[in-house]
Amino acid sequence: MDSLLISVIVPVYQVEEYLDECVQSLLAQTYDHLEILLIDDGSRDGCPRMCDGYAERDPRVRAVHQENRGLSGARNTGLRLAKGEYIAFVDADDLVSPFYIEYLYGLIRTYGAQIAACGYGRSRAELKAAEEARGDGRRAPRCWERMRGNGVRPSAGRAQPERRGKDSICLTSDRMLREWHGKRKRLETVVWNKLYHRSLLAGREGGGVFPEGRIHEDVYVSHLLAAEAERIAVTRQKLYLYRRRGESLTSRRLTPERAVCNLEAQSERLKYFVERGYRPANRRLAAGMFLHWLLFEWKLRGRAVDRKRELLKYLIGVMI
């Protein structure tokens, strides 16, 4: 397998308790031609010191410090500095299988894809194989056999028709978008379970890829990145452990402002699918947004009424 440089961008903010386990899981990758960018986004705990320590001890690690700009700002900084041909994103409170990069890059080479995506787990039990394998980086667990056992022959980077292996499939971008928010919806929206060719992450209109000043960043951009690719390889294998913490953005107490931000992100994404005629994907997205609207209306009981009413009016127009 070629040994191209792959960059891993890790935004770091107030995660002192989890950072070491995350970084150690990256340093233990079986694919070792890595550039690990730790973007300290103005942390006030011990993270800045820890990032510097990793950079001093391992030449693959670069520590970057900046004033707080949020998750999108940290990712955009990482993209500006990344030197790799392929780029992955990992949240600093999560961790990955030792085969995370090798397996995703293997999918890209096998299918000639520009994006590779994997499954993810939310508990240690779901990644038990990865934990057992960490003591022997030379041998992959049975469920993560190397690509020679995946049921397809490597393409050496050449684009292939849609194909299926034992535990993977390669889809055209158009098919991926037409099937959006269907059976693969858990894998689609987030960016941290994927490996991207750097050409897809060039930014738009002079700005960064990720929208700064907004939350639910991935909802705004994941489908746009998929649209830029020709082919996307997907495996159901769980190579990423996603932690849902009480302090994380996705777990914080719901407020009217956060509810509106969520619905606005979904609305922006829905407009893209409606304008391009991706039926029935836009119906599925509209139904999901409506369920969120009902949930927020019940939890918030009449707060942020005007903006929610505007979004509901648009949503009804799409659904009828």
Image (spheres, rainbow, N blue to C red):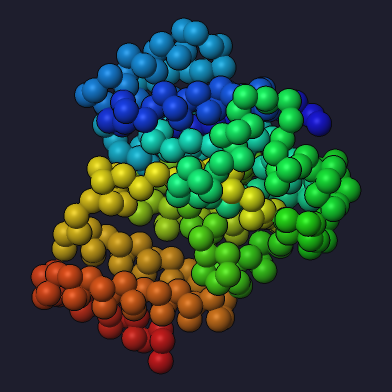
Classify residue 271 by image quadrant. bottom left
- Residue furthest out toward the bottom: 320
242 or 141, nearer to the observer:
141
Q: Is residue 61 above or below residue 297?
A: above
> Can I make out residue 108 in this image?
no
Q: Is residue 64 above or below residue 296?
A: above
Classify residue 96 by image quadrant. top right
261 or 235, nearer to the observer:
235
Residue at the (33%, 77%) spot, across then down: 291
Q: Quadrant of the N terminus?
A: top right
Residue at the (46%, 7%) spot, across then down: 56
Q: Percent x, y for residue 165?
A: 79, 57
Q: Percent x, y for residue 59?
A: 56, 11
54 or 89, nearer to the observer:
54
Residue at the (45%, 14%) spot, across then down: 54
| Relative horizontal placement of residue 167, taking residue 96 as reference (left or right) | right
Across the whole image, how many numbered discs are drawn on residues? Answer: 0
- Residue furthest out toward the top: 56
| Relative horizontal placement of residue 77, taking residue 230 as reference (left or right) | left
Residue at the (26%, 78%) spot, across then down: 294
> Can I make out residue 233 in this image?
yes
Q: Percent x, y for residue 237?
A: 64, 50
Q: Is residue 143 above or below residue 297?
A: above
Q: Percent x, y for residue 43?
A: 26, 26
| Relative horizontal placement of residue 13, taking residue 307 as reference (left or right) | right
Q: Quadrant of the C terminus?
A: bottom left
